Amino acid sequence: MFKNKKRIVPVLVAVVIALFSSTIGAFAAGNPYVTIVNPIQNSKIEGNSFLVSVKIAKAERLKIEVYEAKAGKLALHEPAIFTNTGNRLTYFTRRINKVKPGYYVVAVSTLNNRNRVIYKDKLGFEVTNKAEVVTFNSKTSDPGILQNLLRTILD
């Protein structure tokens, strides 16, 4: 039936590895019981501080790190170790102050009983300077803009 049995075994092994490697990779991505609530992925935060909030839905031991992405792993604070001892919904929250504008990463690692990482969740966001408040000035702004806006509302 098969002319060359020596070639079949390596091909079957490769197929099995390909099938299971994609499944194993899916489990290693993020912890389904841990959610980074704040900040939001790819959001822009105005100001010099922000809040990190992590939702934990079951008993877990977590390491929470915040660092500037372009500087490598320049931490904004010491990594926090947080343990949810019960199977109840819990939140970890910390305010990070005195932040300069830049792109930052929040990384949450789920640790096993030997303090080895078993899941890693991370997201990036940008901190910008506070935006200036833009107000309408009738002396310097085009009055036609306001008139057109009123027409579209009233029509």
Image (tube, rainbow, N blue to C red):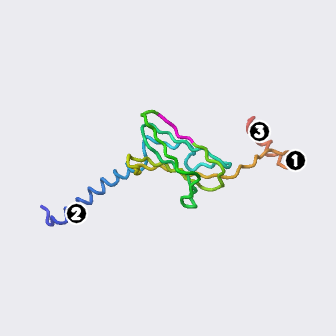
- Disc 1 residue type? Lys
Q: Which numbered marker is on residue 30? A: none
Please give the residue where the numbered disc 2 appears in the rendered image: 10
Closer to the eye: label 1 or 3: 1
Counting from the top left corner in percent of width and height, residue 14 is at 26, 60
Mark 2 vs 1: CB contact within 8 A: no
Which is nearer the N-term, disc 2 or disc 1? 2
Question: Image quadrant for the N terminus?
Answer: bottom left
- Residue at the image point whose x is 37% and y is 53% from the top: 25
Per the model, the C-alpha gap separating discs 1 and 3 is 21 Å
Which is nearer the N-term, disc 1 or disc 3? 1
Q: Residues within 10 Å of mark 1 (few under 14, many from 20)?
A: few
Quarter where residue 6 is shown: bottom left
Q: Which residues are magenta?
A: 89-93
- Residue at the image point whose x is 38% and y is 46% from the top: 113
Please give the residue where the numbered disc 1 appears in the rendered image: 139
- Residue at the image point whose x is 79% and y is 44% from the top: 135
Please give the residue where the numbered disc 3 appears in the rendered image: 151
- Residue at the image point whose x is 62% and y is 49% from the top: 44
Which is nearer the N-term, disc 2 or disc 3? 2
Q: Residues within 10 Å of mark 2 (few under 14, many from 20)?
A: few
Counting from the top left corner in percent of width and height, residue 126 is at 61, 52
Quarter where residue 8 is shown: bottom left
Between residue 12 and residue 55, name the one nearer to us: 55
- Disc 3 residue type? Arg
Magenta stretch, overall SS: strand
Query: Is residue 18 rendered to the left or right of residue 2?
Result: right
Q: Residue furthest left?
A: 1
